[in-house]
Amino acid sequence: MMVINQFEKVLSNFKKLDKEQRKFFLTALVEECNPHEIYTLRQILQCKCYGKFDIISALPLELSIKIFQQLDSKDLCHCREVNHKWKNITQDSTIWKTKCIEILALYQGQEATKMIKTPKEGWEHMYHKLYQREINWNNGKVQRIKYLKGHRSHITDAKLKGNILVTGSSDRTVRIWDLETGQCKLTLNGNVFSCVDFLLTEKVVAGSTFFRSSFIWNMETGELLNELRGHVSAVRCVSLSESHIATCAFDGSVIIWNWKSGEKIATIPANATVIRIFDTKVLSLCGTTIKAFELSNGECTFSAPFGTGLLGWSYIQKHLSTIEASITKFDEIDKNALELPNMINRIGFNYSSRAYDFDTRNGMMVSVEGVNTLNMASVNDIYNPKEIEYAHCKFMFEYDLGKEDIKTVNVDSNYRRIITGCRSGLIAILEFG
């Protein structure tokens, strides 16, 4: 009885203490406890839910999800190990959708996030696939190769936009491929083609030949809209805009036509190697100079030194296509975009690879060494490439890319794939995820 009275007296005195005094008393009491008493105290606190305070579990689910969305994938995995409540939160699809959008925006730009669709396997599974694909891409490890068979002779040129690939060949055909299905949508006949271009908005495709002419077709029906003649030697480059087409040839001229009517607008003695047409101007590489000419009269309105040749030109064209797919006006171009990474500026004409393309957003270059070795390198360290590995990947079928003579290379940075055109007419799609 006396013990109970003493206990009640101690408890009564404890209630009279202020906050600091209580803290001091509890600290002294715990220091006097033996391990078993500490364990008992812990059990009592847990039963009363007075253990570690879990602020995340106490918050509304929507708010907890918003907090977890700020974490990276590695931290989210650590959070799963805390308790069942946190594990359930980290499995919310909203979080992993955010992670998918982030990884696409980081490596492929905001445009890629607009193409994202709800995956059947769930957002978390999709994130794991995207994450692994980036690792494979950065390490040059191909996971699958798909083949497109149709051309009977070597691929001379290839243009890629989204899932549509247009190829020209010396077998006298231009083919339009759907990379999503792997099917050839149309085969267009003409002559031995040297270069191609197409416009998805206008649904037209152009193919120019080694025999001086250029063909314009409707890329849905295959109807021949126009055949243009005017050069006196082989056409080396063709470029389409909404209403005009520009071609440059080994005869030293650039010719502008209205591709809808077939009317010749201007002939420009530019001696250009490659060209790109805009709404009212055509941009060209003329030796060691970039020049822009008015479509209407051929007047030169822009000229700047350019000592990096086709390598630099290819980088710029890919960069312009990457930063804004809808650029149609020369005046919309930030002229700083014509400045190149230091390494490309330094090597210029000395770079010897015969086929290459760029992932300009991530500063990567893919090139062919020798006949069939594909290399990947940083544009700031081109002379230290790593070989792309594909010898043992899945779905090799009866073809062996290692025995092909690669003629063209297209880098699709949005879908993380490389498309190669070969001397045999075979087209190979190298996928990394």
Image (cartoon, rainbow, N blue to C red):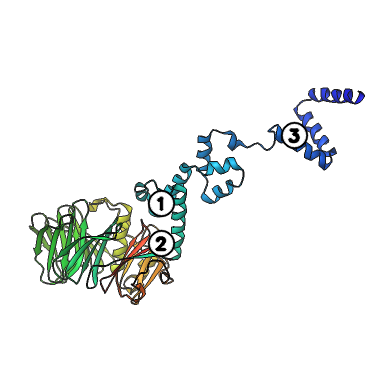
Pointer 3: what residue?
Answer: 44
x and y percentages locating residue 17 in the rendered image: 79, 25
Identity of the residue drawn at 42% across and 47% down: 101
Q: Residue 342 got which mark? A: none
How crowded pointer 2 is (Cα within 10 Å; few <14, some 14-19, many 20+) is rated as many
Q: Is residue 366 above or below residue 47?
A: below
Which residue is labeled 2 in the image? 432
Query: Dot 1 surroundings within 10 Å: few (below 14), some, or many (20 or more)?
Result: many
**Within-10-Å neighbours for mark 3: few <14, some 14–19, many 20+:** few
From the image, state whether disc 2 or disc 3 is nearer to you: 3
**Does dot 3 land on a helix, a strand or a loop?**
helix
Q: Nearer the viewer, residue 67 or 184?
A: 184
Q: Quadrant of the N terminus?
A: top right
Q: Amino acid at mark 3?
A: Ile
Front residue of 149 and 259: 149
Does residue 355 sit above or below 259 in this rendering? below
Q: Position of residue 82 (x, y in %)?
A: 62, 45
Q: In the image shown, does 379 or 37 lie closer to the viewer?
A: 37
Farthest residue, direction front: 398
Determine the residue positioned at 77% across, 36% down: 41
Residue 233 to residue 339: above or below:
below
Type of amino acid under label 2? Phe
Count of labels shown? 3
Horizontal placement of 141 versus 243: left or right? right
Q: Which mark is residue 104?
A: 1
Please report the residue visible at 18 percent of the width from the left and 54 percent of the height from the top.
Answer: 220
The part of the image, by quadrant, that contains residue 266 is bottom left
Residue kind at label 1, given as amino acid type: Leu
Q: Please indicate, yes or no, whether residue 307 appears anywhere in the rendered image.
A: no
Q: CA distance from mark 3 to mark 1?
A: 49 Å
Could you tell whether 380 is left or right of 244 in the image? Answer: right
